[in-house]
Image: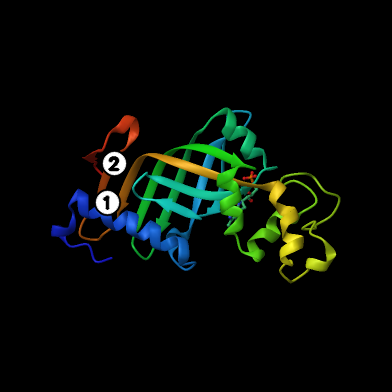
Amino acid sequence: MNMKEEKFKPNLIVEEMWSHLEKSIKDRNHDFHSAVFTNLDKEGLPSSRTIILRNISKKNKKIVFHSDYRSPKIEEIKKNNKCLLLFYSPVLKIQLRMKVQSTIDYCNEISNTAWDNTKLMSRKCYLTSVAPGEIISSASDNLPDNLKGKEPEKLQSEKGYKNFSVVTNQVQSIDWLFLSSNGNKRILFDYSNNNNSFNWINP
Ligand SMILES: Cc1cc2nc3c(=O)[nH]c(=O)nc-3n(C[C@H](O)[C@H](O)[C@H](O)COP(=O)(O)O)c2cc1C
C-alpha cells in the first residue's frame, strides 16, 4: 500500500482495512489470511495460536475462524469470551490489534452451513482420533491410515462434523498501525457499546 499523506483519513483507512480482510478470505497468499488468536487459559494465562480467517462481515464487524471443538480453547472461550486477534502484513506494513468477544457455534445451523462450505482437505483436520493438545505415546497426526497424503471422500469426511466448531469474533476495537520511513501512523477504532469512534494515537 502506498499511503500518501492525503490517504490518512479515518474513513479511507477503515474502507481499505476491511477490504483487505475480505480479500484475505479467498486469497491464501494475503498476509491477513492468517492471524494470531489469544485467549486466557484455565489458569488465567494468555494462550496464543495461529488461525485461518474463514469469514468476515464488514457490516457487523465479525471475523470467523474454525476450530476443533475438542480443543481446550473452546471451553476457555466459553468461560471468558474476551479475546484478541493480531494481524501483521509485511507487504502492507500494517499491524491490526483487535479486541474481540468470541462465541462458539457447535452442531447448530451456523456450524452446519460452515461445514457444508468446508473443503474436503480442510475437513480432514477434524478426523483425528484424539483431541488437540492430548498427550500421545509417539509422534503422530492420529488420522486414519487410509488418509495419509490424501483428502477424504465426502462420506468419510462427514465423521469430522462432530469435532467441528465455528468461532465468531465480534470486534470491539481495532488498533491500526502503519509503518513508514515518512513517519509511522496509528489510529484506534472503537466499536464497543455501539460506538463508532476513532482516536489518533502516538505510534
Ligand atoms: C498456518 C496455521 C493455521 C492454523 N489454523 C487454525 C485454525 O484456523 N483454527 C484452529 O483452531 N487452529 C489452527 N491452527 C492450529 C493452532 O495454531 C493450534 O496449534 C491448535 O489450534 C491447537 O492449539 P489450541 O487448541 O491450544 O489452540 C493453525 C496452525 C497453523 C500453523
Spatial distance from mark 2 to mark 1, Cα to Cα? 9 Å
Residue under pointer 1: 14
Residue beneath the point at 71% across and 47% down: 162
In the image: residue 114, left or right of residue 173: right
Q: Does residue 115 lie above or below 75 as drawn?
A: below
Q: Quadrant of residue 171?
A: top left
In the image: residue 106, left or right of residue 27: right
Q: Position of residue 186 (x, y in %)?
A: 26, 47
Amino acid carrying mark 1 in the image: Val
Question: As rendered, which of 21 and 184 lies closer to the eye?
Answer: 21
Amino acid carrying mark 2 in the image: Phe
Q: Is residue 190 among the parts visible in the rendering?
A: yes
Residue beneath the point at 37% across and 49% down: 96
Where is the N terminus found, in terms of image quarters? bottom left
Residue beneath the point at 70% across and 54% down: 126
Callout 1 environment at 10 Å: few (<14), some (14 to 19), or many (20+)?
some
Q: Which residue is most to the right?
A: 137
Callout 2 environment at 10 Å: few (<14), some (14 to 19), or many (20+)?
some
Residue under pointer 2: 189
Q: Does residue 192 lie above or below 65 as drawn?
A: above
Q: Which residue is most to the left?
A: 6
N-terminal label among 2 and 1: 1
Q: Quadrant of residue 119?
A: bottom right
Q: How is the image coloured?
A: rainbow
Q: Evaluate if marks 2 and 1 touch, with contact meaning CB atoms under 8 Å apart.
A: yes
